[in-house]
């Protein structure tokens, strides 16, 4: 199965030695490497009655890639460990690895190694390596009072899609698609780093939750302006139909892997970024000067 | 749980940014990084009624570290993704991470990132990064006819220990310990690389199986000399008591993570290495000029 997963795949120039030996060797031109890992478990992070194996593969890579661009770096290499029941059809593992490779290829990166073992349920563990291109990483800890708070990418779409799935509604295919395969604004990460972002993170747990992590790490507070977070027509229509609060999806929905960052007060925000609030002295994230009374951050669906 | 796993742990000098942000940053002084990943699953790669969680953690790190030293490199950083049932006691995950850190610290390396998620069974997925120190990696594909075949470290101990466990014998604690926590000859990897090893691998599937991979990659054959593979008194005693063939353990037992390498015919083998045979033209691995009639390589115990 490992052979099937790597056969005939093109490796990028950064791969000095690809799969097939005891380990792979990857170029790290600036003398450092950015690295992150995530594990996805069937029934908790994805459901095969909702998502195709290809979508699961894409999502697993996307959430790992988002961690790298949130540092201002770019993914170069992925390692993929898959545990699956012995009854798993080869068509499923083939589709899973196809999805992984499709999203990896979108970065111009390669799958350079992996492992495939028997397990009781499908488990996908991905590690991503990235290249800072000689620049300093953008941490969560650099936000300062008076900075602008800004985001790039969709907020609340994945949560809205999950609500539609749970309600067995077929009216919102775009939102459901966003839940199955997030579309992070990858390029906006390095762009923000070059534009002087003082802090950055990806939105995996929900905007308030992840900005809360940034506030804690930076020793600051943030006030978000709900008028700048206006849900678009897609979310508003779904919220009305499903009896939900669209702004709550925006503020607390996870898994979109949007990017959130702080920029100096006088910085011109780069393309793709929009201002949503300000950094203040203090601690915690408020909306329009008050604690948000809605959900407290997103959890997996089980 | 992630906080518990990283709190108060010292990071090596190679860790530029440790856990707690979207990704970690690791030094890659020679402009490249060696990387490998392995997944261990409860019930397949370990049993918690046999091994303590600390032993499981040590073993998971050891088998990953062995992949790096088998390239002639040295491990610098580990990423650890753990899936476990929600009922798992904190004492178990604490002991698991203690074992992981203990083996990691033996390398002078650090755990720089991870993930902890709910799963139906305990799954440990580890990724290791290593440093070649400016040297070329030693691949499986470099063995040439007339080279010496040599090994460093124990062979067959893990298989013998597994046999003792399956037989519920308490007479061979050293062999059982070797099954629970392998003791790879880590230093012998870089030492072999500096001494001119033409090919190297770690013995995870069994000596004949892993040398077979080396033969395939190198386009050569090997002949091993059984007189040079004489099982020691520990294996011989266990084989006699358990009705097994000690030489079969040596030739086909997996999971010891010994190192096997080819060296030029005229090379003086470095300390820790012993000659066991020769590289020939052709393909496949023979013992005393014949195919080995015993087991065909090691499989997990289920």
Image: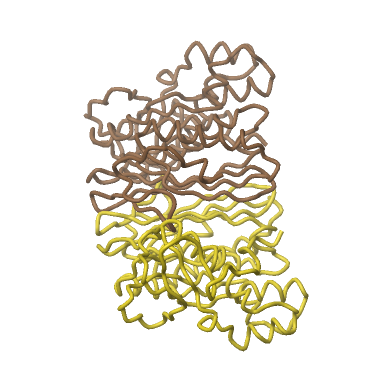
Chain colours: A brown, B yellow
Residue B115 left/right relative to A263: right
Q: What percent of the width, then of the height, locates residue B286?
A: 53, 69
Asked whether the viewer can see residue B119, the reply is: yes
Q: Nearer the viewer, residue B66 or A56?
A: B66
The residue lying furthest to the right in this view is: B168
Which residue lies at the image location 49% right of the left edge and 72% below the top edge?
A: B258
Looking at the rendering, in which quadrant would you find the C terminus of chain B? bottom right
Using the image, determine if residue B267 lies above or below residue A19.
below
| Residue A71 point in image, percent of width and height | 34, 42
In screen coordinates, is B185 left or right of A25? right
Q: How many marks?
A: 0
Vertical position of residue B79 compared to residue B231: above or below: above
Q: Position of residue B135 (x, y in %)?
A: 27, 64
Q: Residue furthest bottom?
A: B233
- Is residue A297 at all visible to an observer of this figure? no
In this rendered view, identify the residue nearer to me: B243 or B187.
B243
Q: Is residue B89 above or below residue A162?
A: below
A151 or A276, nearer to the observer: A151
Q: Is residue A55 left or right of residue A217?
A: right
Residue B113 % position (x, y): 45, 53
The quadrant in which residue A133 appears is top left
**Image point 53% across, 80% down: which residue?**
B229
Name the image quarter holding the N terminus of chain B: bottom right
């Amino acid at each position: 199965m490992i052979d099937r997963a790597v056969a005939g795949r093109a490796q990028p120039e950064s791969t000095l030695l690809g799969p097939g030996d005891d380990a792979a060797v990857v170029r790290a031109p600036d003398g450092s490497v950015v690295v992150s890992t995530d594990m996805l478990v069937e029934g908790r992070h994805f459901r095969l009655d909702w998502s195709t194996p290809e979508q699961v593969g894409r999502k697993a890579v996307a959430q790992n890639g988002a961690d790298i661009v949130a540092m201002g770096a770019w993914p170069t290499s992925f390692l993929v460990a898959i545990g699956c029941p012995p009854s798993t059809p080869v068509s499923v593992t083939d589709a899973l690895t196809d999805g992984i490779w499709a999203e990896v290829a979108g970065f111009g990166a390669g799958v350079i190694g992996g492992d495939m073992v028997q397990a009781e349920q499908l488990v996908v563990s991905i590690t991503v390596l990235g290249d800072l291109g000689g620049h300093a990483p953008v941490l969560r800890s650099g936000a300062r009072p008076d900075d602008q708070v800004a985001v790039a990418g969709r907020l609340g779409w994945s949560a809205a899609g999950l609500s539609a799935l749970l309600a067995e509604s077929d009216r919102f295919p775009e939102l459901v698609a966003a839940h199955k395969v997030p579309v992070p604004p990858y390029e906006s990460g390095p762009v923000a780093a070059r534009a002087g972002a003082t802090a950055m993170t990806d939105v995996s747990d929900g905007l308030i939750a992840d900005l809360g992590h940034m506030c804690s790490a930076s020793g600051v507070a943030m006030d978000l302006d709900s008028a700048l977070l206006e849900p678009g027509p897609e979310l508003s229509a779904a919220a009305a139909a499903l009896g939900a609060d669209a702004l709550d999806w925006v503020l607390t929905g996870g898994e979109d892997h949007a990017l959130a960052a702080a920029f100096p007060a006088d910085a011109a925000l780069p393309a793709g970024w929009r201002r949503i609030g300000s950094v203040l002295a203090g601690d915690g994230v408020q909306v329009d000067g008050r604690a948000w009374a809605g959900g407290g951050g997103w959890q997996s669906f089980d």
